């Protein structure tokens, strides 16, 4: 089944899909960061939501 793009939360909440704008919008709001800062975190630690959250709070 294809992703429903109208959903506000990601399908797999353990991963951040930077290629999906609705997911980027969700995660930037959740973490309170810009898209660029989110991308920096994903580049540094991978797309795991827990790892990105830890990176952003240090």
Image (cartoon, rainbow, N blue to C red):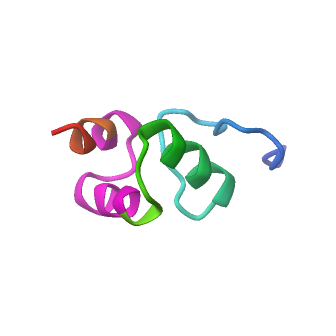
As drawn, 20 above or below 33: below
Q: How many marks?
A: 0
Q: Residue furthest left?
A: 58
As drawn, 1 above or below 35: above
Counting from the top left corner in percent of width and height, residue 8 is at 72, 38
Counting from the top left corner in percent of width and height, residue 57 is at 23, 37
Rendered residue at 56%/54% (across/down): 24
Counting from the top left corner in percent of width and height, residue 52 is at 32, 43
Q: Quadrant of the N terminus?
A: top right
Q: Is residue 57 left or right of residue 49?
A: left
Q: Is residue 31 left or right of residue 6?
A: left
Residue stretch rendered in magenta on the structure: 37-52
Does 29 lie within the magenta span?
A: no
Residue 10 lies in quadrant = top right
Residue 56 lies in quadrant = top left
Rendered residue at 58%/64% (across/down): 19
Q: Quadrant of the C terminus?
A: top left
**Magenta stretch secondary structure, dominant:** helix
Does 45 lie within the magenta span?
A: yes
As drawn, 42 above or below 11: below
Rendered residue at 78%/47% (across/down): 3
> Camera-side residue: 26 or 20?
26
Rendered residue at 39%/56% (across/down): 38
């Amino acid at each position: 089944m294809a992703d429903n793009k109208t959903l506000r939360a990601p399908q797999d909440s353990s991963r951040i899909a930077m290629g999906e704008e609705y997911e980027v919008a969700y995660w930037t709001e959740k973490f309170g960061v810009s898209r660029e800062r989110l991308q920096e975190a994903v580049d540094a630690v991978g797309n795991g939501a827990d790892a990105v959250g830890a990176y952003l709070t240090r």
